[in-house]
Image: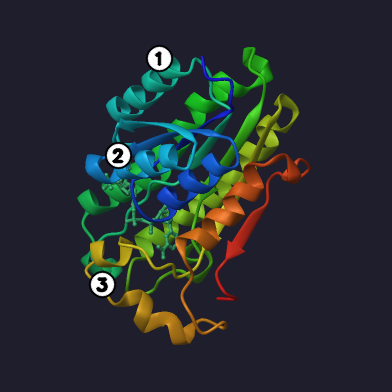
Amino acid sequence: MDQNPVLLVTGASRGIGAAVASKAAEQGWTVLVNYVQNESAARSVADQITANGGSSRIVQGDTGTEEGIAAIFAAVDREFGRIDGLVNNAGVVDQTARVDEMSRERLERMFAINVIGKIRCATEAVKRMSTRHGGKGGVIVNISSMAAVLGSAGQYVDYAAAKGAVDTFTIGLSREVAAEGIRVNGIRPGIINTDIHASGGLPERARDLAPTVPMQRTGTAEEVADAVVYLISSRASYVTGAILNVSGGR
Ligand code: NAP
């Protein structure tokens, strides 16, 4: 059995999650690359990790559902029999809209994936990592957004509110499990050049907003991944309950 520490990265087939998977593998983590739809993208992330001498597996699972989360953690148990880290990255936006145009169905999907999914993945990880449950400890990083602070008026206030919940969850969980060997931190990316903007109907959003960033540019998935890899490493051994802005000053 693989003796490397095992890291689950949700939503790792593209964007920030894919960059986290690659960089974590370079640091000696065996990575479980989760995806929901795009199996070929997940496979290329895993193939690239293998080509670079690392170790990974892929697993399909919708973090917005109980069945999806059960499938992901069944793969954790079956493939590795352990988990040492979780990067709660999977997240979605919706079409830009004002609050008075948002349906209940939209809000339920938004919170199912962006909030409940993250809490439920953390629940399963804590059950396996906490010394209270016989585990050896571990690390969790929750991917939030600067939207949690800025509010995303006129675009997706629901997404911003969900990310606010992620921040609060990060603080609370970090205190709850700090004495059980688990560190929990968050990252708030700013405007990062990934597919997420196109999925919200605004393919040029990153480019259009670049001039509003104090550093006058968008960020890359790799720049966010570098911060994640630091937080999951032993170099961050006394860091817990922290939420790091990776946003070019936005
Ligand atoms: P992205 O490019 O749209 O990629 C999304 C990833 O999440 C894909 O791997 C996708 O899998 C997966 N995914 C989506 N829904 C899922 C579900 N229900 N279950 C499992 N996986 C799911 O997104 P990104 O920009 O890298 O964003 C990653 C995280 O960073 C999100 O939490 C997002 O809110 C946050 N963030 C992004 C930005 C930004 O500007 N990009 C800014 C702030 C925060 P498939 O390939 O299978 O579809």
Residue furthest bottom in the image: 211
Percent position of residue 29, x then y: 56, 34
Residue denoted by label 3: 203
Percent position of residue 181, x then y: 71, 27
- Closer to viewer: mark 3 or mark 2: 2
Judged left or right of residue 193, residue 222 is right
Residue denoted by label 1: 78
Whether the residue under disc 1 has CB within 8 Å of ligand 1: no
Q: Residue at x 42, y 44 (%)?
A: 115
Quarter where residue 72 is shown? top left
Whole-angstrom CA distance, mark 3 to mark 2, is: 25 Å
Label 3: element kind:
loop
Percent position of residue 91, x then y: 37, 50
Whether the residue under disc 3 has CB within 8 Å of ligand 1: no
Colour logic = rainbow
Q: Earlier in the sequence, mark 3 or mark 2?
A: 2
Judged left or right of residue 176, residue 166 is left
- In this orientation, does residue 1 appear? yes
| Residue count near mark 1 (Cα–Cα under 10 Å), binned few <14, some 14–19, many ≥20 | few
Residue denoted by label 2: 43
Whole-angstrom CA distance, mark 1 to mark 2, is: 19 Å
Q: Amino acid at mark 3?
A: Pro
Judged left or right of residue 180, residue 15 is left
Whether the residue under disc 2 has CB within 8 Å of ligand 1: no
Q: Earlier in the sequence, mark 1 or mark 2?
A: 2
Whole-angstrom CA distance, mark 1 to mark 3, is: 39 Å
Label 2: element kind:
helix
Q: Earlier in the sequence, mark 1 or mark 3?
A: 1
- In this orientation, does residue 11 appear? no
